[in-house]
Amino acid sequence: MLNRPKTQEQVCRECFFKAFEEEVHQTIVDNKLFKRGERLAIAASGGKDSTVLAHIMTTLNARYDYGLDLFLLSIDEGITGYRDDSLETVKRNEQQYGIPLKVVSYKDLYGWTMDEIVSQIGTKNNCTFCGVFRRQALDRGAVLMGANKIATGHNADDVAETVLLNILRGDVPRLGRCANIITGEDSPLPRVKPFKYAYEKEIVLYAYYKKLDYFSTECIYAPFAARGFAREFIKDLEAARPMAIIDVIRSAEDFVFAAASDEKLPQPRTCERCGYISSQPVCKACVLLEGLNRGMPRLGVSRTRGRHGEKAGLHPDVGRGSVSGAGSAEAAGGRVRTAATSVEALQGAEPVQEAAAAEGCATTSSRGGDDGGLQQIEGGAGSATGTGSKPTTEPAAGAAVRRRGPVEIEYETT
Amino acid sequence: MCHACLELNVNGKVRALKTHKLLLPGDNIAIALSGGSCSLTLLSQVLPMRKDASTPRKERGKIPFGLTVIHINDASAHGATATEAEAHGRAVVATAQQCAAIAAALTAAENGGGVGSSSTGATSASGIAISPGLDVWVVPLRDVFLLGDTRALRREAVHSWRQQRQDKPAAAADEASMPGGEERRDAGVGTGAAGTSDGAEREARLQQLLQAVQDPTGREDLIQHLRRRLLAAAGAMAGATKLLCGDSATALAARVIADTAKGRGFALPSDIQLVDARGAGAGEPTFLYPMREVTVKEAVFVCRLRGLRPAELPGPLLLARLAAASSGRHSHDPRRSINNLASTFIDSLQANLPSTIFTVLRTSSALRPFSFNSPDAMPATCSAVTACGQPIDVKAPHWGSTDGGSVASGAGAAAGSRVGAVACCLLCRAPLSARELRAIAAAAASSSVAEGTKKAGAGSVEVAEVEAGAEADEDEDDAAAPFCESCRGQILFRPGHHEARGGEEAAGGGAGDGRARSLVQGLLPEALVA
């Protein structure tokens, strides 16, 4: 017998499992999250949410015959002592649930691991980097595997915290979107949150009683996160009134925004460097990466204005020359090729010869299969990195800065 | 920030009322004074804006308007004894008079000791006698049960006035300050004794109502809703068209967070604007919130600078007493109220990051306000003194008419005579969202014919009938009552109901709980739910 956190009812174990699974099923059905025959990437970190998600999706897919093609997608941020352990868990999950696994790493995609990033920028804004990079990494991994949808394990507590955070930060556009159960439905790769109404406590209970295999340490950089305040408040709220978490989500769903703010909302377009979806000329990941590569860690993180009052971040014309060859390749169709060229493009302002070399790899890889392609890209990117993009880009970067003039006013060295 | 700048800053925000034409000559306004620093600051800023009626010539920058100060005494609702509540009321009056005296002194200083207020206006008596008079009307919360009965309300008003001016030849002041006839004075004298005994009975009813609400947040919110209704009625009684409240920016930011946590996301923008003309159609004054950009800290400083001392309830003492005295079930209620949590949260964030409050307010101002939040919704001041007859509640029956409960196109409220019909909760007057309306309509539609006698569209107070009905009928009738989900969950119905929303069905609610479901609804003042 246990006390259900969400409703304070006394139920037996079996009834709890049933109730929990039914609620998730109901969420999926009511919100029409899936269509028959879709290929679904389950974002798996090895933590409780994604493990339970994998378990439940497999169970419900079989029980209610959703007709979905499932696979696990995992991201290796390169955090020792945390991510490498959790990845082991995901590999075990692959065996346990019988669904294939794909691991994409920051090192391969961007040339930087989180540990390296933190050593460069400190612990204050590292969550920004990790989050931005992970989102892209998930999308690229899913595209590479030919998925139609991504399912993440965000639970009710997460959504409630996000709502609160956005109110506190004054982020109105995000506030309007964060409580949606499907985001990006018009994009080729929508994301769904089947656990949107599931409490974190219940997920833990479920995993515990079902004896699911999951990794339960929090990220070693987590104590520095701003989300901590919102989280504490949500926990207090839950103690005062368990339904309050759902109420926060409902409030966010009910928010009606004044029309005026709509006009100022940015419209989605594509990044000029890598082709990823972006609201600015250059996507955030490219901006951050540029900052990392050039030893300017505040680039894209703190607010600056260009000399002529332009927006902070990279001027769209910077680094054009080096990736112009790649640019034409991007314009061409083909997901694998886009991913391939964008991988090398993400390296930032590279010397032209290295770009050509990487492009060469890309073209060869496009002939191969998906997986093979990726390995070759990784090899190509690896070599590009190996030839020391950092030392070589610095003089190039220095040249770039000189060429452009003092666009970035803030320049902090760690 | 130096003292002078602070005063100017706060003053400027309040004076903005004048620039936005929200405060016009010939207006009759009321100020809600809780005795706390914010409302006291508001009073001290508004008083100097007022033209001294003693000189006929125009004074620069001053507006002639009639002013009443209303204090809703809810001390007893928070656990104070009767004597303490009385004492608190008197303390508030004294603070108000002190404020008036100081303001008068300041004005006198400005005028170079000129006409009007005496420069020795230190004693409250002379200050009042000479200046146009600061009418402070202390209304105990229990009078919310008199809401439908304006004559009775007036009687109580006279009673409290008389009590204030016991040792003064107050007859003249009474007549001058109150628009009215002989009969009320006589009524006041004659029914003075009767008034107090009724008062005790009303007090008991109030306590019973509050005890019936089991959720601590719900109880606090209920007190606030009742306060607000009483304030509106009192303001209407005093003939005011506008009612100024001292809600600070800090309070507003905490309210944003708390309302989000209660699921009131749709109604949120209606409570945080400068103008709130919800009750205009019923003859109630428009609520204005000129202090919404002033933080509590600033208000406290201004009070200190001006030598004003706020009269506050001894909060912790009352809480401890409540905890000790309440019986069994509530003896140690570990649940803190959500309001409390939200304000602690905001305070702690603000301590580290002073922009928190304003960022929260800026975010919430991105939400679309309702039609009654626009100054156009205020009735024209010429028709100020509306008849204080039975208030017609325009909100109740308009279920079908509003398309999904959404806003009638904002600025178009022609001449602001009647606010566009926005379906609102009966208790807290929150606009109902489309989802809530659908649920109510569905419940109303599915309720059987027998229940048709209980007005399916409006809350029913015939508790007896409801109890006689079957369990299922009760569910539907309750669900068909026009209350917002938040009121329904935390105030009206049993606490289990709230949690049961998480489960698939509310079945097995328990036979015993059936009665408790409508208990609170039955205890509410009739005028509110009629």
Image (tube, coloured by chain):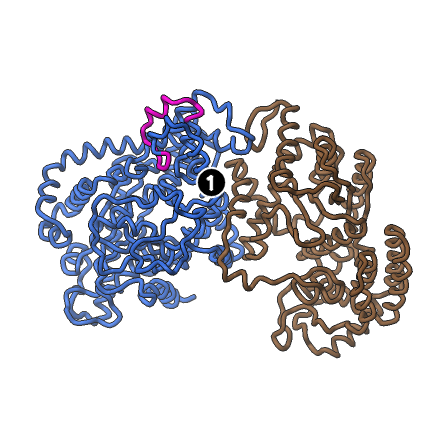
Q: Colour of chain B?
A: blue
Does B427 appear above or below B213? below
Q: Position of residue B292 (x, y in %)?
A: 40, 57
Which quarter shows the N terminus of chain B?
Answer: bottom left
Q: Colour of chain A?
A: brown
Chain letter of the residue beneath label 1 in the structure image: B
Q: Position of residue A306 (x, y in %)?
A: 64, 74
Q: Position of residue B461 (x, y in %)?
A: 32, 31
Which quarter shows the C terminus of chain B?
Answer: top left
The secondary element bearing badge 1 is classed as helix
Query: Which residue is disc 1 drawn over?
Result: B438
Q: Badge 1: few (under 14), some or many (20 or more) residues near its Cα, within 10 Å?
A: some
Q: Left of B449 or right of it: where is A275? A: right
Q: Position of residue A237 (x, y in %)?
A: 52, 40
Mark 1 residue type: Arg
Residue A49 appears in which quarter of the rendering?
top right
- Residue extending farthest front: B449
Q: Residue at x 20, y 42 (%)?
A: B150
Span shown in magenta: B456-473
Q: Left of B212 or right of it: where is A106? A: right
